Amino acid sequence: MTDPLPSLRETVARYSLTAKKALGQNFLFDANLTDKIAREAFARNKDAFENGTVIEIGPGPGGLTRSLLKLSPKHLIAVEKDERCLRIMEELQALYPRFDPWNADAMTVDTSTLGDAPRCVVSNLPYNIGTELLLKFLQKASCFTGFVLMFQKEVADRITAKAGDDAYGRLSVFANWLCETERVMTVNKSAFTPPPKVTSAVVALTPREKPLFPAKADLLERVTKAAFGQRRKMLRVSLKQIGDPQKLCDAANVSPMARPEDLPVEAFCAMARALEND
């Protein structure tokens, strides 16, 4: 079947569209790569593609959008803040009636309510707000079948890190508490226009039926903020700001001499429960 659209580069040139650093934009023109990301998302979130809603954040000129549309999702919603991209989105909508572009700031949109369930999010997230968006998604992780998201490799490493890894931190604890995480591919900077200064990576997150261990999110946030706020210090020092370090460590069955990067998610959840019962 012949593609009814001009090439992505031709489209971008026609509208004189250039990536804006202020919006964290880096455009993907490699159709083989965007097709691969879309297929990965479909394999992990087939029910959302066939029976619910696929959500893309920051589609830009629509490279990944085109790849998603090739898979004939029942409903694809793209949330794009940059008004310059709307005419390109409208061209796609004219050919694909199930495509629904939204001109909005993703940070102000409740993604968990877009379209009908089941929902998944597939996106090359804007670099400048990628972590913020992920934390926003995680607050309502149970509303989604999964996420397939591109980040700077450094952020991807933090999301998928396990206890003992150099990149392990607060984001690792929260992401793995609520989801199964996996880095599915690394993307060279040369794949983008303009090329970013860093390598990127695609991460898949699959929400758990329930959090890995019982804990209240706000208390888990307090514990991890205190612990990783002074990550090179022992817990006996870093936990003083929120409670009795010995008591918290005893609840988690860990030594007050330990450092936060060595503690599994379970230990932080145990400390959060101890705070609740204090």
Image: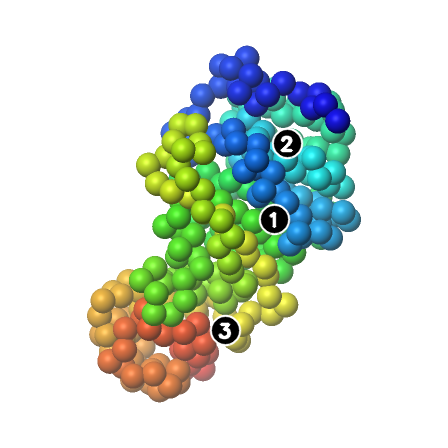
On screen, residue 254 versus residue 48, left or right, reads: left
Labels in figure, total: 3
Which type of secondary structure does the marked residue at label 1 adopt?
Answer: helix
Give the image quarter of residue 71. top right
Q: Secondary structure at mark 3?
A: loop
Of badges 1 and 2, the one in the foreground is 1
Q: Quadrant of the C terminus?
A: bottom left
Residue at which label 1 appears:
40
Upstream in sequence: badge 2 or badge 3:
2
Tags 2 and 3 touching, CB below 8 Å = no
Judging by the rendered image, the residue that carries numbered circle 2 is 66
78 left or right of 196 in image: right
Q: Nearer the viewer, mark 3 or mark 1?
A: 1
Task: Give the Cα separation between the discs numbered 1 and 2.
Answer: 15 Å
**Circle 3 residue:** 215
35 or 126: nearer the viewer:
35
**Residue 92, percent across and down?**
67, 25
Above or below residue 242? Residue 41 is: above
The amino acid type, in three-letter code, at marker 2 is Arg
Q: Is residue 182 left or right of residue 240?
A: right
Q: Amino acid at mark 1?
A: Glu
Secondary structure beneath dot 2 equals: helix
Q: Looking at the image, which residue is at 44% across and 79% down?
A: 270
Q: Nearer the viewer, residue 228 or 7?
A: 7
Q: Are marks 3 and 1 in contact (CB under 8 Å)?
A: no
Separation of residues labelled 2 and 3 (CA atoms): 40 Å
Q: Is residue 13 above or below residue 253?
A: above
Residue 226 in view of the camera: no
